[in-house]
Amino acid sequence: MNSLEGVVVQIQGLSSSAGDISRLHVILKQAEESLRSESTRLSPILNQLDPSNHSLGYLYILEACTSASVSKEQAAMLVPYIARFISYCAPEQIRLAPEKFIAVCKRFKDQVMLLGTPMRGVAPLQAAVRKLQNSSEHLTTLHPEFLLLCLLAKCYKTGLSILEEDIFEVDQPRDLFLYCYYGGMICIGQKRFRKALELLHNVVTAPMSSINAIAVEAYKKYILVSLIHNGQFSTSLPKYTSSAAQRNLKNYSQSYIELANSYSTGKIAELEQYVRTNEEKFESDNNLGLVKQVVSSMYKRNIQRLTQTYLTLSLQDIANTVQLNSPKEAEMHVLQMIQDGEIFATINQKDGMVRFLEDPEQYKSCEMIERIDSSIQRIMSLSRKLTTMEEQMSCDPQYLAKAGRERQRFDFDDFDTVPQKFNI
Amino acid sequence: MEPEGSPSLKMIDEIHSNGGINLCDGDVDDEPSIDDTTTTTTNNRPIISSGEQLDVEAYGGLYQGRTKIMRLLFIAENCESNPAMRLEALRMAHDEIKKGENTQLYREVVQKIDGELGPNYAMDSAWCDSVDRRADQKKEKLENELNAYRTNLIKESIRMGYNDFGDFYYSHGALGDAFKSYVRTRDYCTTSKHIIHMCLSAILVSIEMGQFTHVTSYVSKAEQSPEALDPITAAKLRCAAGLAHLEAKKYKLAARKFLETGSELGSHYNEVIAPQDVATYGGLCALASFDRAELKSKVIDNVNFRNFLELVPEVRELINDFYSSHYASCLDYLGNLKANLLLDIHLHDHVETLYDQIRNKALIQYTHPFVSVDLQMMANAFKTSVAGLEKELEALITDDQIQARIDSHNKILYARHADQRNATFQRVLQTGNEFDRDVRSMLLRANLIKHEYNLRAARKH
């Protein structure tokens, strides 16, 4: 009792200056054990503390509080506390004990899911991610948790806000795998296939010493999305892909590769037949929806191909060549594609003719100039980044030692030339 | 005028003499089923000709030796629809085999004839036995001779010995052994003449075996000979190389080789190829693979090749028609030639591909100069329906061979001019995006590797 009370007093007293806080941190670390043993009695204390001023202390107590498994009722009671804490806590304090903060946030996510209301966790976790990361390029362990909640709550747009930032620094490879996988799924949900493809590609080609389930699932989705987005899929992975992935991925996703082969024939009936016979497989992978999108993308692809060859074509002819049942159906498809900006065309309903037009973009507008300019800026900053990294790398003593050593093994004369290599 | 005239004159002689031989056979004319084909020979009308049926008699007369037999048998096998022609071909093959010593082939042919040509063409086992017996004796004799030469170590004699063995095997149809024997002479060749002789023998056997990779290598070996080749040999080598390229489906190279073939060839190589064939193969390959300028400079203005073309006026006409854009008549000629070309032992496999390529070329050439083309008129020019033409054009446009788009409502084809500026913008933006994406994922991977490396280093300490 005493110790608990004492801790509270300490927290209240030592939360103002940076020096105090680091002292408090030491005290809290020592008190960790005793806090845990009293976990059941801790919740009332939370009311005595202010989450924004006493963030570190609050964090320790919350962590101890949630360390035991919680029932549904307890969770219902705790969730608002944690949510409030996450939104008010001071970032500089919680970054002193990131593992505690991560643990609390993870439990928070579990509790929200236990309650069956993932939506409630979306906003707090987004705030948590922001508070935990020290720059927008930093991938925290909370990223995948946040994206998972977004997926479950179907708040894809919120998820996208975080996906738009470029990630370079990674703590744990597993975080990156999950982040890219969930991110890919969110982008698919928003039909941003290009971004989805990029994220899934990152999973598939990431360095890995052994194959993992995330990569396999990502590869399956990667195949489907490339079919939807590019209309084709090449089974050869880029050469920087880890050998584990290159060897194994194809074996685990045979039916998807066959789907891609069937797609490449361009025959809609064959593809549909294949999907029908393998429906269960896709269903059990939870990919049936995507597979159906693949099938419908083939109609689009075939219609798009027609725009390359024809200026005008009757709806009946479109229906025939694309193997749709009726001109009406063809009209719906064409209409949809015009709406989505996938083709440029006008339909003349009087005689049932479609007139395909050229892309009206003339690359003369201010917006286009701005877009190009922003692209250039982006690439310039990227290339600056690249140079910095290269400089860092070439100054790295470990790297130099290794590079020098490997050279020596081949030829002694080469050894002298090594430094020149890093002059760039 | 002189060089143009001479080969065709020679040809006429050739046909006349062959006609004479056939008449000497006498019993031929008794066969009622063949009568009408035999009577139409002996004018100098080209053999692979339009419209009417292939004149087997005259066709066979162009060749000699094994290729004549094989070509005839090929015709017999591939003209199921025409029993009279089949029997005629078999009959001629039979007669030709009887002149040689290949009993194996003889038995096969007799089996194929199956008594349909009367008692004269029944199995003559006495002949077979005597030939076989003689062959055994000859083989023994040759072996003894060769052994004697080898003990004496006289290079020239050993070479001759192997060469005789090659000839022996070749005439008895053991092509593999013949090839080996001819190749073995190589170690005993002392002059480049010998080497060329060896190469030509090897080429001949390889062509018969269908081993066209050997043909290419022996042609190049022969062409490397330090002494200048005499024109006839050079022409033979060109033909052989052309055939090899044709079989390998390298039509452009084949066309070049056939076009380079000197008119000295005449009928000197009729154990492999007739000058008419050079014209047909070369002409079709050239049409299928050359562009307009090349066609003009290398085919139409080629004085040398014109001599060959004179032998097959149809091919000459169709090339000229193609060049002067009379596609309908060009395609007419092609259509008429097709049935006979399908009976050609070397060309039959390639006829469809060549025809498709020629037709596509014609379509592309037709559309090329126009901004807009009326499909109805184009369909007339190509003797096809508008719908069929649309399909063909669609395929070509999809393949990016014609830059145009079809107005299927008004049935007009409009040329499409690629907008360089827009295309450049598009490409630039795309390249930028790709670069952006690649660099970012690369940085990410680099960081992951760094992480792993640090982790491993940390574990080590």
Image (cartoon, coloured by chain):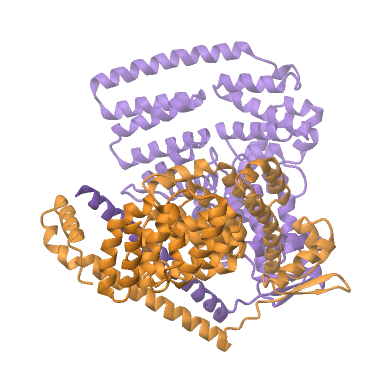
Q: Quadrant of the N terminus of chain A?
A: bottom left
Q: Nearer the viewer, residue A353 or B230?
A: A353
Chain A drawing hue: orange
Q: Position of residue A416 (x, y in %)?
A: 11, 62
Is residue A84 positioned above or below A226 on the image? Answer: below
For the point 50% across and 25% down, which residue is it?
A: B171
Q: Position of residue B26 (x, y in %)?
A: 72, 26
For the point 49% across and 76% down, which residue is it?
A: B428
Q: Nearer the viewer, residue B109 or A96?
A: A96
> Is any part of residue B282 visible from this angle?
no
Whether residue B388 sits left or right of residue A265 in the image: it is: right
Chain B drawing hue: purple
Q: Position of residue A55 (x, y in %)?
A: 39, 69
Is residue B325 positioned above or below B91 on the image? Answer: below
Q: Quadrant of the C terminus of chain A?
A: bottom left
Q: Position of residue B101 (x, y in %)?
A: 54, 21
**Residue extending furthest toward the right:** A350
**Residue extending furthest toward the front:** A2
Q: Nearer the viewer, residue A318 or B50?
A: A318
